[in-house]
Image (cartoon, coloured by chain):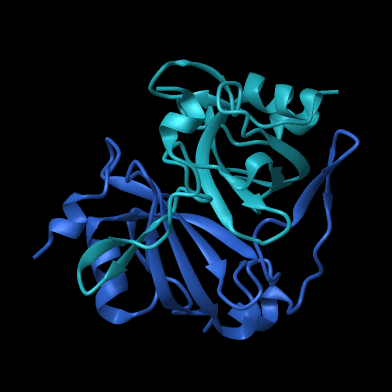
Chain colours: A cyan, B blue
Amino acid sequence: MSAWLDAVRWNEEGLVPVIAQAEDTGEVLMLAWMNREALALTVEEGVAVYWSRTRHKLWRKGEISGHRQIVREIRLDCDGDAVLLRVSQEGGIACHTGRRSCFYHRLEDGQWQIVEPVVKAPEAIYGA
Amino acid sequence: MSAWLDAVRWNEEGLVPVIAQAEDTGEVLMLAWMNREALALTVEEGVAVYWSRTRHKLWRKGEISGHRQIVREIRLDCDGDAVLLRVSQEGGIACHTGRRSCFYHRLEDGQWQIVEPVVKAPEAIYGA
């Protein structure tokens, strides 16, 4: 029944890196981590539940911001050590900075330049 | 001069996870790892150079298969601990199994199903 969870090659900390991709635009939104419980809950609830490595607890993406990720598809890679979620990103904002994607720095001539606009100010998302 | 490399939050093993995405189709092709040298070489050479965690050495993607990844754009995420490459995938095949993408297992009713065809048999890629 949980054989599919056993097929994931969890790292020594019991985690696997998870890529979230917008199903409509194909944008790569973020990379986060899940433990076994987070992945099981993601399937059960149909929304992305990650493991916060800084807070050391489950992190229901969007529980404060409202920017939940409705999971449309879950993929596992060839060697089982990376997961890809295809999601419908509520609010169109994945990043805590108020941008669509967390990957908003682009390397240009040896410098990271910010190339994505803030769609909604973090204060407006999280409260002042 | 290498301030952009210092901006990356390398993990305790000196590595960062790197997502490769096809620039034309938007497909997520694979997730691999780079150390500082690999990322510097990737920029210098314009093709993806990863760090093989199993072989413990630099891995010039495509050096045997010919399926190099020409790097069009390099992105860094909000907290600096994940990299996104937008690449032109030579041969249209990223996976060593001969598939376009490494993420060819899809979770369906509690089972990982293979949902992407083999474009070219591995024997034909790597020799019998």
Question: In the depicted view, which residue is nearer to us: B72 or B41?
Answer: B72
Outermost residue toward the right in this view: B109
User: Which residue: 32% across, 47% down?
Assistant: B15
Question: In the depicted view, which residue is nearer to us: B111 or A87?
Answer: A87
User: Which residue: 38% across, 63% down?
Assistant: A115
Left or right of A8? Residue B19 is: left
Question: What is the quadrant of residue B110 in the picture?
Answer: top right
Question: What is the quadrant of residue A50 in the picture?
Answer: top right
Residue A111 placed where, x, y %? Answer: 21, 65
In the picture, which quadrant includes the C terminus of chain B? Answer: bottom right
User: Which residue: 71% across, 69% down?
Assistant: B99
On screen, residue A120 above or below A10: below
Residue A117 placed where, x, y %? Answer: 43, 56
Question: In the depicted view, which residue is nearer to us: B49 or A111?
Answer: A111
Residue A92 placed where, x, y %? Answer: 62, 47
Q: Is residue B4 visible?
A: yes
Question: In the depicted view, which residue is nearer to us: A87 or A40?
Answer: A87
Left or right of A85? Residue A4 is: right
In the picture, which quadrant includes the N terminus of chain B? Answer: bottom left
Residue B38 placed where, x, y %? Answer: 29, 63
Question: What is the quadrant of residue B84 in the picture?
Answer: bottom left
On screen, residue A48 above or below B40: above
User: Which residue: 50% across, 49% down?
Assistant: A119
